[in-house]
Amino acid sequence: MGAIVITGVPGVGKSTVINAAAEASKLKVVVYGTEMFQLAKERGLVEHRDQMRTLPPETQRELQEAAAKRIAGMGEVIVDTHCTIKTPRGFLPGLPEWVAKGLELRQIILVEAAPEEIAGRRAKDATRVRDEDQPASIDEHQRQNRYAAWATATLTGATVATVFNHDGKVEDAKQAVIKVMAGRA
């Protein structure tokens, strides 16, 4: 069957949406970044998760590949991940060819919101250490995610769908993801 990737920029609320989708589908959720972080921590490369994006691109690639191998052995799952990772050197693909094919992707669901909404959510989130982004930068990141999703779909044959998670509309976003996963959207 293959993996279902649900993705979005930090602060869009994708994890909230994913939890409902997993509950409805009875699929396990695997957080790709957590798999990568565990590997990096085991190797003594980082102490906390927000340091991951500052690792050299070569190291991030190695961690991506190792995490994909771990996840592929788990069977059909929902993968909570990022299509692109904003780094000091530019955007790094979160689903490069070796990861996408290794996961046997069948579906990519982009969770999006207005950049101003995301900026507001990030400003209120004291649980993470993040760069402050202006709406224009968030918009650029969402555009990069769309490009990356379609490039990945071209390589794998996965479908791509976009679901909006606007402020105060989490339930609508959850229902939309469930419909897309079931092929009823």
Image (cartoon, grey):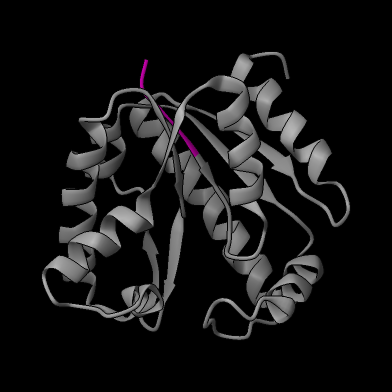
Pick whichever, 3 or 148, lies toward us.
Answer: 3
Pick whichever, 77 or 140, lies toward us.
Answer: 77
Query: Residue shown at 17%/77% (left/top)?
Result: 45
Asked whether 2 falls inside the magenta stretch, the response is yes
Residue 82 position, x and y percent, is 46, 55
Residue 79 position, x and y percent, is 43, 40
Q: In this figure, what is the number of numbered marks?
A: 0
Pick whichever, 124 or 65, lies toward us.
Answer: 124
Query: Residue shown at 58%/53% (left/top)?
Result: 8
Query: Residue shown at 42%/42% (left/top)?
Result: 151
Q: Is residue 150 above or below residue 93?
A: above
Residue 178 position, x and y percent, is 67, 25
Report the residue that reaches farthest toward the left.
43
Q: Is residue 149 above or below residue 108?
A: below
Q: Which residues are magenta?
A: 1-5
Quadrant housing residue 17: top right
Q: On the picture, is 87 further left or further right than 100?
A: right
Dominant SS of magenta comes to strand
The N terminus appears in which quarter of the rendering? top left
Quadrant housing residue 158: top left
Pick whichever, 165 or 92, lies toward us.
Answer: 165
Q: Is residue 18 above or below residue 116?
A: above
Q: On the picture, is 106 further left or further right than 58?
A: right
Residue 121 position, x and y percent, is 74, 70
Query: Residue shown at 81%/39% (left/top)?
Result: 171
Residue 94 visible in image: no
Asked whether 21 falls inside the magenta stretch, the response is no
Report the residue that reaches farthest toward the right.
168
The C terminus appears in which quarter of the rendering? top right
Quadrant housing residue 180: top right
Residue 179 visible in image: yes
